[in-house]
Amino acid sequence: MRRSTDNKYYQTENTGKGFITHGDNEFEHISGYPGNIWVTKNLEWVERLSLTELTKTRAQEIVDAAISGSEDPDGNQVVINLP
């Protein structure tokens, strides 16, 4: 199995069953964020889905746009910072 030493950022829609298998996540965690952003070091999962890497800055812009206007229970803008 191949993995990166650093987190990599991708945008793709979750296609449902088989999108992330137990084995994929067991080998190297795959995290999902608003705007269909995925963060992982699992290069085999990336290759299986033919994903194109985004810069962290671009991925953060997509997450920010997806949550724009979202508020927590106290009325504060929700903020998510990618790892």
Image: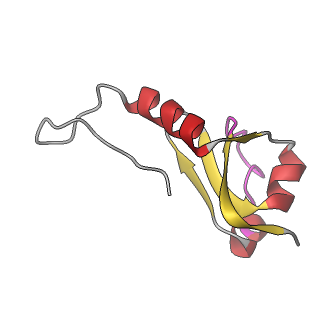
What's the magenta region? 11-22
Which residue extends farthest left? 74
Vertical arrangement, residue 75 with respect to residue 46, above or below: above
Residue 80 lies left or right of residue 10; in this view the side is left
Q: What colouring style does the render use?
A: secondary structure
The stretch drawn in magenta includes residue 72 = no
Q: Position of residue 74 (x, y in %)?
A: 10, 41
- Percent of width and height locating residue 68: 35, 27
Main SS class of the magenta portion in the image: loop
Which residue is at a point 80% across and 41% down the rendered structure image? 51
The residue shown at (58%, 45%) is 56
Q: Position of residue 33 (x, y in %)?
A: 51, 45
15 in magenta: yes
Task: Tell me the residue at 70%/74% (across/down).
Answer: 26
In the visual, does 72 lie left or right of 12?
left
Q: Does 81 sit left or right of 37 as displayed?
A: left
Look at the image and tell me in which quarter the N terminus lies.
bottom right
Nearest the eye: 3 or 45: 3
**Residue 66, percent from left and from top:** 45, 29
